[in-house]
Amino acid sequence: MTDQRLIAQRLEVARAVVADAAALAMAMRPPPGGPVGSMKGVQDYVTEADMAVEALVSKRFEALFPEDGFMGEEGGRQREGGLTWVIDPIDGTSNYARGRERWCVSLGLMDGAVPVAGVINAPALGEVYTAQRGVGAWLNGRKLTASPVTDPKNAMVETGWSAKVSPETYASHAKAFLELGIAPRTGACGALALADVASGRCDGYLEPAINLWDVAAALVMIEESGARVSPFLQDGGLTGCISILAAAPGVAEPIAAAAGMRLL
């Protein structure tokens, strides 16, 4: 495993680079209204800002850490390295494309197959999450701790939506959660949904189909907050689009059972 001091140095640099990327995204953000951008698939938007933000971050890290690998949602794997930066330039693009506020720039650092650091910057919300494996996770400098909720009837769980999953599957998850007394939510930004579990704002997040760039930064936050997570990386998430579940420890087992998922 790479030295913690080296990871800490990179995390500080990443925070600054992501701040610049978030400022660029804010400057390019469409006004509220109908969606601005093009479609990669059903309800799967891409905007000029997605491309511009990813290019900015990629070029910065190529100059700063040429030995590191880099991959992004828009450009795929661009460089190889033992340490690899993984970016979703704008997570929550469907929100961003309509001038809404729930979106972020998400940048994770992987040491081989292990997430070791992450930055999530949600500039429209004024929130910056950071995390380093084995050290901690923070929101605007405040240490993150998963929710203390132990009764599913007091729990709030967010469920993501994907065109890759049938409406019947989505409805069955919602039904199973409602039968436990859980309050379902959806916010259309996977990275922030996972960060909400880490911060205790939400007690669970189920996404039926998600990619590494959506979760690379948040996985460190989940681990450091004491929340539990499904074996996303072990089950194929390094290279494929698969499901993920994160949950507060006190309600993790009933939520996982309702979702038909297993947890680490």
Image (cartoon, helix red, strand yellow):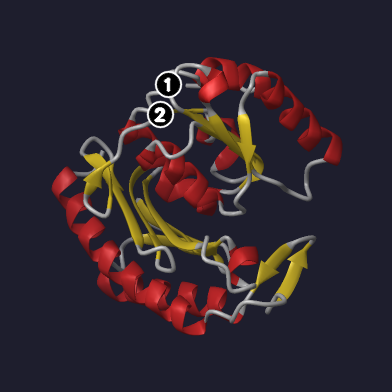
Q: Amino acid at mark 2?
A: Ala
Query: Which residue is rendered at x = 80% and y = 34% of the image?
Result: 171
Query: Which residue is rendered at x = 84% and y = 40% of the image?
Result: 166
Identify whether 112 is placed above or below 181: below
Q: Work out whether residue 262 can be spotted.
A: no
- The front one of 204 and 73 is 204
State if disc 2 and disc 1 touch (CB < 8 Å).
yes
Spot occupied by residue 186 in the image (x, y as percentages of width and height):
63, 46
Spot occupied by residue 138 in the image (x, y as percentages of width and height):
27, 46
Identify whether 102 is placed above or below 61: above
Query: Which residue is rendered at x = 65% and y = 18% of the image?
Result: 180
Left or right? Give the position of 223 relative to 27: left
Q: CA distance from mark 1 to mark 2?
A: 5 Å
Mark identifier at residue 91: none
Q: Amino acid at mark 1?
A: Pro
Q: Quadrant of the N terminus?
A: top left
Left or right? Give the position of 118 relative to 1: right
Query: Which residue is rendered at x = 45% and y = 84% of the image?
Result: 27
Mark identifier at residue 227: 2
- Whichever of callouts 1 and 2 sits on the residue coming sooner in the sequence is 2
Residue, disc 1 = 249
For the residue labelled by badge 1, is the local secondary structure a helix, a strand or a loop? Answer: loop
Q: Work out whether residue 36 can be spotted.
A: yes
